[in-house]
Amino acid sequence: MNFKKLFWIKSVISGFVVLFFINLMDKIAKNNDYYKNLAIISFLGFFTLLIINLVFAIIKKKIAKK
């Protein structure tokens, strides 16, 4: 697997994660604590994307060693 393919896989997964969190924000927008929920979901989305990037960075390092 080359790096270009790995980049596209990471981009697709990150896109789906962003869409998931946008959909989640839309579902809870009717709540009274809108800004509190927005902050929590933004925090979760940020760390989810951070974990995805870290996992793919580790995979990229392992591929580069081979």
Image (cartoon, helix red, strand yellow):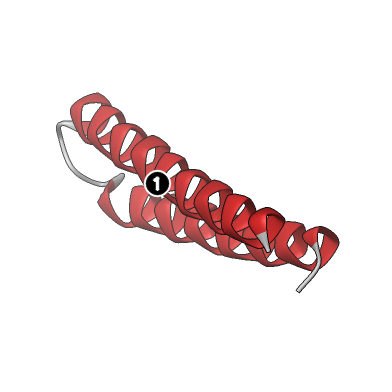
Q: Mark 1 is on which residue type?
A: Ile
Quadrant containing the N terminus is bottom right
Q: Residue furthest bottom?
A: 1
Q: Residue furthest front?
A: 66
Q: Quadrant of residue 63?
A: bottom right
Whether 18 is drawn above or below 1: the answer is above
Quadrant containing the C terminus is bottom right
Residue 31, given in percent of the width and then of the height, sits at 18, 43
Identified at 44% across, 39% down, the residue is 50
Q: Residues within 10 Å of mark 1 (few under 14, many from 20)?
A: few
Q: Quadrant of residue 65?
A: bottom right
- Identify the residue position indicated by label 1 in the image: 51
Identified at 47% across, 52% down, the residue is 52
Q: Is residue 20 left or right of residue 25?
A: right
Whether 23 is drawn above or below 37: the answer is below
Identified at 36% across, 48% down, the residue is 25
User: Which residue is more in the foreground, 23 or 48?
Assistant: 48
Q: Is residue 64 left or right of residue 4?
A: left
Residue 53, given in percent of the width and then of the height, sits at 52, 45
Q: Is residue 31 left or right of residue 51?
A: left
Whether 2 is drawn above or below 29: the answer is below
Q: Residue furthest left?
A: 32
Residue 22, given in percent of the width and then of the height, sits at 46, 51
Whether 36 is drawn above or below 18: the answer is above
